[in-house]
Amino acid sequence: MRDLAVRVAILGTGSMANSFADGLAHANNIELVAVASRTRSTAELFAAKHGIQKCFSSYAELANDPDIELVYIATPHSRHKDDSILCLQAGKHVLCEKPFAINAAEASAIVDAARQQKRFLMEAMWSRFLPSFVKLRQLLADDAIGSVQLLLAGGAFQPERGDGSYLWKPELGGGVLLDAGVYPVSVASMVLGTPAEIKACGRVGEYGIDEQDAVLLQHDTGATAMLYVSLNASASPDITVLGSRGRIYVHAPMFAPTRLDLQIYGEEVQRFELPFIANGYQYQTMAAAAAIRDGRTESEIMPLDETLTIMRTLDRVRAQVGMCYPMEK
């Protein structure tokens, strides 16, 4: 059964949808069969670009197409809950782009729908499936650096202010935390688990979105994560994991790294070159397809309960920063 290609459709036609489609050209158990946009001409252009046979101008029409098994949700953040539930209730498996939802309440509603329908659901945290992150988890499981004491992760970039991007639009779920901060928060979750204490500060700017956030996560083991993201400065996004016996440095960019350094204290640095094929978006989808063919409803690498925990952490950070979205008021 696993050798049968899983038939995939894309909801949305923005930059993430294009990257996703480009990656699937390098997947070996996937067939990209359909795309939907709210504008027919946009769907047709996307389909022609990526060699997709079917295009729809209605999300519901795509969700109800019996030829589709798995739907990738690439619509704006503010639509993730409704679009995911629409597809799940139509009997489709779902891979939902990060951030999984606007808040933990929305995320819980999506997970509940998947469990009721007994369908596969996963947050599309694509970086976890890249060779570099596979190696990072292996080194930590092998106790290569001893017990983890500190995790440092973050990055900063300066897009053009108010350029019309969703980043600057609170009604679409914009802001730096949900867009970029989800990466370091997810890394901290993967390495350290659920935080016991969360402290955050940041800035909500003129556009009504959080432009900068700094986060401290304290864990019951005694380990601490120090995370940051900003739209007001520039810094390469990287990760440092400090343990009792050594350190691991994950080279930038943290969301798509190809190099990892391991240093046991007092010894020479060991460098691991870990390239990925094409843009790397295909790895998460191949893992989802394998799980679907195996009859599983969630991923062991990005489990649903962890996605919910991450969303709760993001909620608490936003509450301390003072970032509230219009749909939450």
Image: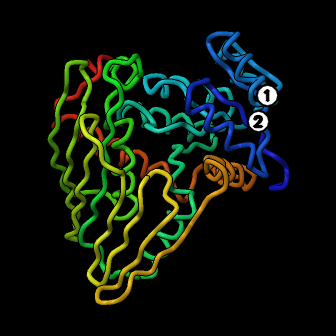
Q: Are marks 1 and 2 in contact (CB under 8 Å)?
A: yes
Q: Distance between the Cα atoms at labels 1 and 2? A: 6 Å
Residue at 51% in and 23% down: 82
The residue type indicated by label 2 comes to Leu
Amino acid type indicated by mark 1: Ile
Residue at numbered disc 2: 32
Instruction: Using the image, tell me which numbered label, if any, was put on residue 287.
Output: none
Rendered view: 29 above or below 210: below
Q: Residues within 10 Å of mark 2 (few under 14, many from 20)?
A: many
Residue 317 in the image: state x and y as whole percent: 22, 41
| Residue identified by numbered label 1 | 52
Identify which residue, 113 or 222, lies in the foreground: 222
Badge 1 marks a residue whose secondary structure is loop
- Residue 308: image location, x then y, percent: 40, 45
Residue at the image position 31 percent from the left and 38 percent from the top: 177
Q: As drawn, is 322 to the left or to the right of 166? A: left
Residue 185: x, y in percent? 33, 50
Would residue 210 be found to the left or right of residue 269 on screen? left
